[in-house]
Image: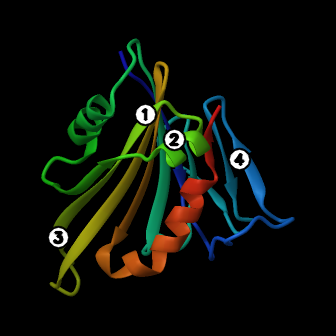
């Protein structure tokens, strides 16, 4: 049985490369992360969810946690995610998290996966490529997945912000 708790996170400005007095710790029963003071919350339609958006047309950051009745592997979490959300997407890249990434996040194992999806913009009739970057963290019977969804044209601009966000995530 999978109990799923979603927390949708996004950015409204640039994530700083260092912590400032205005940075805000965000904590749940499963994890903590430091949010830039630019984050603004908006309600989500899903129960137990919180949304934080930057400019919704640029990127959406989310953290999904799973409380499982078994100790998952990175492959098991990826299988759950593919079934839940990535039907029709292409796996573009996958790697295990480094020992430094695991130590910093207080996790036992984890992986990074990048998925791609091609779609046509209904208004302009132009082809757009969407990317979804997922960092999966596992500890005991719990997993947290940080997901960043964006168009591939925004990737280079968002890459430093994604890395900063991930560096400030920690399993509790």
* Contact? badges 3 and 2 (CB < 8 Å): no
Q: CA distance from mark 2 to mark 4?
A: 20 Å
* Contact? badges 1 and 4 (CB < 8 Å): no
Q: Please count the marks in the image.
A: 4
Label 4: how many Cα within 10 Å (few below 14, some 14–19, many 20+):
few
Mark drawn on residue 119: 3
Q: Residue furthest front?
A: 99
The label nearer to you, 1 versus 4, is 1
Which type of secondary structure does the marked residue at label 1 adopt? strand
| 153 is higher (above) or lower (below) than 51 | below
Residue 118 is left or right of residue 99, and the answer is: left
User: In this rendering, does residue 7 appear at all?
Assistant: no
Mark drawn on residue 84: none
Mark drawn on residue 109: 1
Question: Where in the figure is residue 42, as x and y percent of width and height?
Answer: 61, 56
Q: Quadrant of the N terminus?
A: top left
Query: Splitting the image into 4 quarters, where does residue 35 fall?
Result: bottom right
Mark drawn on residue 102: 2
Q: CA distance from mark 3 to mark 4?
A: 34 Å
Q: Residue at x 75, y 50 (%)?
A: 25
| 21 is higher (above) or lower (below) than 88 | below
The label nearer to you, 2 versus 4, is 2
Q: CA distance from mark 2 to mark 1?
A: 6 Å
Q: CA distance from mark 1 to mark 4?
A: 23 Å
> In the image shown, does 40 or 116 lie closer to the viewer?
116
Q: Quadrant of the C terminus?
A: top right
Which type of secondary structure does the marked residue at label 3 adopt? strand
Circle nearer the N terminus (2, 4): 4
Question: Where in the figure is residue 50, as x and y percent of width and height?
Answer: 58, 46
């Amino acid at each position: 049985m999978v109990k799923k708790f979603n927390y949708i996170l996004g950015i409204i400005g640039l994530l700083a490369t260092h912590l400032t007095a205005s940075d805000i710790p965000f904590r749940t029963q499963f994890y903590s992360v430091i949010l830039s003071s630019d984050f603004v919350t908006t309600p989500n339609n899903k129960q137990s969810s919180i949304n934080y958006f930057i400019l919704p047309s640029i990127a959406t950051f989310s953290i999904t946690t799973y409380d499982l009745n078994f100790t998952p592997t990175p492959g098991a979490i990826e299988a759950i995610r593919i079934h839940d959300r990535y039907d029709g997407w292409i796996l573009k890249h996958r790697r295990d998290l480094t020992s430094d990434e695991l130590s910093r996040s207080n996790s036992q194992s984890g992986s990074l996966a990048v998925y791609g999806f091609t779609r046509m913009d209904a208004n302009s009739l132009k082809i757009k490529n969407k990317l979804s970057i997922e960092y999966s963290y596992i500890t005991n019977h719990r997993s947290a997945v940080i997901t960043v969804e964006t168009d591939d044209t925004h990737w280079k601009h968002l890459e430093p912000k994604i890395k900063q966000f991930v560096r400030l995530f920690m399993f509790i």
